[in-house]
Image: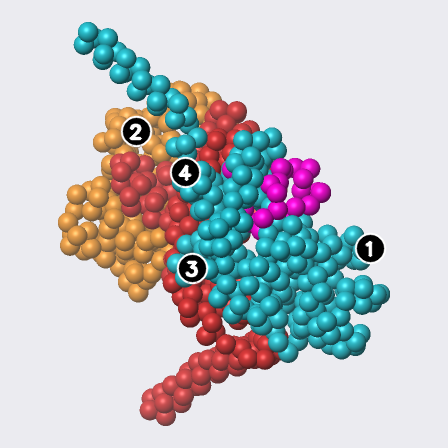
Chain colours: A orange, B cyan, C red
Amino acid sequence: MKLEIKNITHQYDVEVLHQLNFTLTNYKSIALIGVSGSGKSTLIRLLSGLEKPSEGSVLINDVPVSDKLYRDHVGFVFQSHNLFPHLSLKRNITLILEKTRDKSKQEANDIATKYLKLLHLEDQMDKLPKNVSGGQAQRAAIARALSIDPKIIFLDEPTSSLDPILTHEVLTAVQDLKSLGKEFVFVTHVLSFVRDFADYVIFMHEGNIHEHGTIDILDHPKTIELKEFMRKVH
Amino acid sequence: MKKIFNMSFLLILIFILTACGTNENEPLRVGMDLRYPPFETVDFNNNPEGISVDVAMAFGEYLDREVEIVNTNFLSLIPALEADNIDIVIASMSITEEREKSVDFTDPYFYFKIISLVNKDFADANDLNADSSIDDILAIDNARYVGLATQVSATIPKTYDKDVIEATDLGTAVESVAQGSADILLMSANPVIDGYNANKDDTMIIWSAFVSSPIGMAVKEGNSELLAEANAFIDTFNDDGGLYETLSEKWNSTLLEQSDQLGLDFYTNE
Amino acid sequence: MNKPTVPSLKKALTSNTARILAAYFFAALTIIAFIVWVVVKQTDNFSFAPFIDYQNLIVRGVGNTILISLISLIGSMVLGFLFYLLQSSKIKYFNALIDIFTEIIYGTPMIVMIIVMAFLIGPAFNSLNRNFFGVLALILYMSPYMKNVFKSAISSVSEEQYLAMDLFGFNAYQKYRYIIIPQIIRVLMPPLMNNFSLIIKGSALLNFISYAELYYVINVAQSKTFAFVEGYILMWGLYLLLTIPLSQLTKMIERKWAL
């Protein structure tokens, strides 16, 4: 994927990005790391087109993220699964496929079942989000993001609301998806996952892209801040 | 010639129409509380009926106006008059000094003797019977009186310096005498008799009248026109074929059913 | 290996439900026994018979209670929604208006509301229609509560959900039809039905303006039959007949639709 961030200025919650510029090509799985408030949540929301920057523009694969065309091929997994609470796990998916992707009932059902099975949720398909575990709900959210057949999937701290066991469960499931040929951008605190899943790392600090490179930088940080970060997280 | 004829015809028509005035076409709104049989009550289909209803209808006939019975909570009758919600109150309302401060009453057309419904145990304990005098009753020091708020049943004991528990409806008042949480209820004959009939084992009636309460119709203070018409109407009651006669014919059997002491004349005489 | 355990499991289950049923049965019996004792103390010959003559009247009373309650329910929902809109408006004057209005209504007893509307405000508008203003009083009284119900129901759909809806490309109609409104209704129902029950119970106060609802018609029948104890028991029973099924229905819906 080709990532172009041009002069971005935006505020989300307490995070502030100010005149950020960055370009990246050729990587398929990008991790955003940094302490809370460093700007990574803001950045991923801008990259996915979920939010529009106050100033500046973002292009991915030469397409502006504000384009509907871009948004139709993007999947997003929120920190808290964000499934529609009144619908079953399966219906959460089929509703989208039927109404916004023009699939027939049968097609939608098949696709939903396929992805829910992929995420090991065959027994939970007809349950409501409140009746499954946090890990299962998050996996369902991932299945939902996959079901629209996106080219890029964005995950914003997908396991931070889960305990270590469920975290492991979800991240293992995500790793199984590597074979699907999709591209990923994700924010996470779980460095082992970064090592296993990412091929590029962007370290953010105080609203800036402070250091970036392949996963090597985790073991050989150049900047003091990244050194500090790695020391703390260990 | 034709023009002058048409013009004058038109003028006469207008004159007649305006002379008819606004009142004649508006119904007379009569206020009463339809929970006091047999004077103010309803039939099985919630239509107003009763002696006061008949009086109201007869008044309407007398004035050549339609009558609308406006069912109003007794406590709200005078406020309703003052707010022009109703034109006149024909609700077996006693003429009292207090009330005269707010409304204008007609001459009395009925007299309600106020008698007593007494708790049986209380009566036995104090040697009271059906013929005891009011002095006998008043002599008892700790008698607990119950009465309906704003009505003579509450104000009369007070004039004798007695304490009165005030109830808001007839049912509660009667029940308290039957149960013994009160000893004496002063009311006009009908409710007392009905109350006794419903609680024959626990209550008794003492017939001597505390007062003979004059009953009048009430109009808004200053409505001298309607007041004069009402008084003129009342003057006709004693005539041959007047209202007392027609009411007696219609209602005596019903009244006598309740107690053989009461024909309509029980109410028409002081 | 399975056979011995399955029958005994069944037995355990049925004896548990049987125990619960028995508990409810005896509890109901205790309460009924208490009521019977109270009644027997008051009257020698308890009988509903005198009321049979008044069945037309009583049916009419029940009908009017239901009618007026439904009208008040719908009216207060409409007005409550309007209050909600005005309260969330950007125009500060509207916010202040609703705030003050609500404070006043919260502080006014329902009976006072009815009297003020029917005898003060109605006449001020030259209206003699007491019933209309009585119902209006009920509607006004319940509107703030309805407003709160709408507020909590509408806010139950989180910001994040709106983002998700946008993300997946739903159009406005789809958002409301499939996601927003179904959720709002689920959250809305239980408190709405509770409010309905409140309205039914409050409608009894309309007897004061002589509206022929249940309390009033029983009063009338009592004035003719003097069967006061039976009358009150009958009145009580009829109100329960209206409110208890409603509350059971509410519980069922709560269980089914809880989010």
Label at residue B43: 3
Classify 10 Å Cα crowding around label 1: few (below 14), some (14-19), many (20 and above): few
Question: Residue B64 bears which disc, if any?
Answer: 4
- Tell me the CA gap for discs 4 and 1: 47 Å
Residue that appears at 55% across and 63% down: B263
Q: A16 or C131: which is nearer to us? A: C131
Q: Nearer the viewer, residue A197 or B208?
A: B208
Q: Earlier in the sequence, mark 3 or mark 4?
A: 3
Q: Is residue B209 visible?
A: yes
Judging by the rendered image, the residue that carries numbered circle 2 is: A65
Whole-angstrom CA distance, mark 3 to mark 4, is 25 Å
Residue C114 position by quadrant: top right
> Residue B79, how many percent across, how many down?
59, 40
Q: Could you classify mark 2 by the number of other residues whose Cα lies within 10 Å: few (under 14), some (14-19), or many (20 or more)? A: many
* Amino acid at dot 3: Asp
Callout 4, which amino acid?
Asp
Identify the element where label 4 is drawn. Answer: loop
Badge 2 and badge 1 in a common chain:
no
Q: Nearer the viewer, mark 4 or mark 1?
A: 4
Give the left or right position of residue B262, taking residue B41 as reference. Answer: right
The mark nearer the N terminus, 4 or 1, is 4
Q: Are marks 2 and 3 on the same chain?
A: no
Q: Please report the bounds of the magenta region as a residue range.
A: B87-109
Q: Is residue B198 above or below residue A228?
A: below
Nearer the viewer's eye, disc 3 or disc 4? 4
Q: Chain of mark 3?
A: B
> Is disc 4 on the same chain as disc 3?
yes
